[in-house]
Image: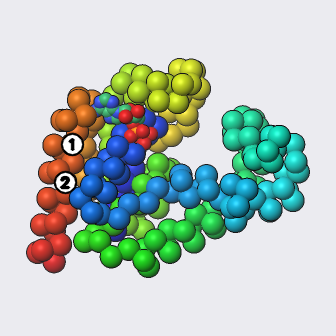
Amino acid sequence: MLIGLTGGIGSGKSLAGDFFKSKDIDVIDADDLAHNALDKEGEGYKKFLEIFGENFLDESSDINRKALREYVFKNPEMKVKLEEIVHPIVQKGILNFIKKSNSKYRIIIVPLIAETKSSSFYDRVLAIECAKGIQLERATKRDSSNEEQILRIIKSQASTEERNKIANDVVVNNGTKEEFMINLEGIHKKYLNLLEND
Ligand code: ADP
């Protein structure tokens, strides 16, 4: 059983991923795959230089992600070019993960399942929901970012309603971490039950 775990920035996806890992469930984060693709040793690094040149490299030849993010935000046609480099590498990584994984079920963390209309790829979609004010506060603190930048990202993502429409299960993460863990425990048990009755 393949679960797509989704939610807006700062909703608690990584924390949820850690919970499932602690239950011996294999978890992969599509954002990590995308990030690794552009590492110096990453599969997309050479292609990136061919298309974007060396303007985004810092003194250790690493890609300055912040500058790149700003640039593609202002130049949507370059965002498409960047996605053309990164997406196939992420897809390959996901297929590899599925092939290798042998846990009872498996989880792929993908922030943009609703946005990319890709819910049919998964057996079930689990959405993490978080009130906008709390989400903003948590993400701003985690990224040492400013609220304006986080708000911009929240606005570019699907709304809670859009996400919940494609979700089979929704966990609300407005309370304490302990409460979040208890609710995730319930989801884990539900998945195990579904597998048993399959
Ligand atoms: P995402 O992966 O969806 O962007 P994270 O799991 O990284 O979100 O959570 C964002 C930040 O909020 C992290 O610093 C995380 O530790 C914190 N956080 C998540 N859920 C809670 C909670 N229930 N109570 C307090 N802090 C939380």
Q: Quadrant of residue 119?
A: bottom left
Viewer-side residue, 191 vs 64: 64
Query: Residue shown at 46%/55% (left/top)?
Result: 29
> Is the residue at mark 2 in contact range of ligand 1, meaning its CB lies under 8 Å from it?
no
Q: Quadrant of residue 103?
A: bottom left
Q: How far apart are labels 1 and 2 at the CA level? A: 10 Å
Numbered tag placed on residue 187 in the rendering: 2
Disc 1 marks which amino acid? Met
Numbered tag placed on residue 64 in the rendering: none
**Residue 47 appears at what percent x and percent y?**
80, 62
| In this picture, residue 158 sits left or right of residue 83 | left
Q: Is residue 22 above or below residue 75?
A: below
Q: Residue furthest front?
A: 60
Ligand 1 found in image quarter: top left
Q: Residues within 10 Å of mark 1 (few under 14, many from 20)?
A: some
Q: In the rendered image, which residue does mark 1 sit on?
A: 181
Placement of the C terminus among the 4 image quadrants: bottom left
Placement of the N terminus among the 4 image quadrants: bottom left
Q: Is residue 131 above or below residue 28?
A: above
> Is the residue at mark 1 in contact range of ligand 1, meaning its CB lies under 8 Å from it?
no
Query: Residue shown at 70%/65% (left/top)?
Result: 43
The earlier-in-sequence mark between 1 and 2 is: 1
**Residue 21 appears at what percent x and percent y?**
31, 57
Nearer the camera: disc 1 or disc 2: 1
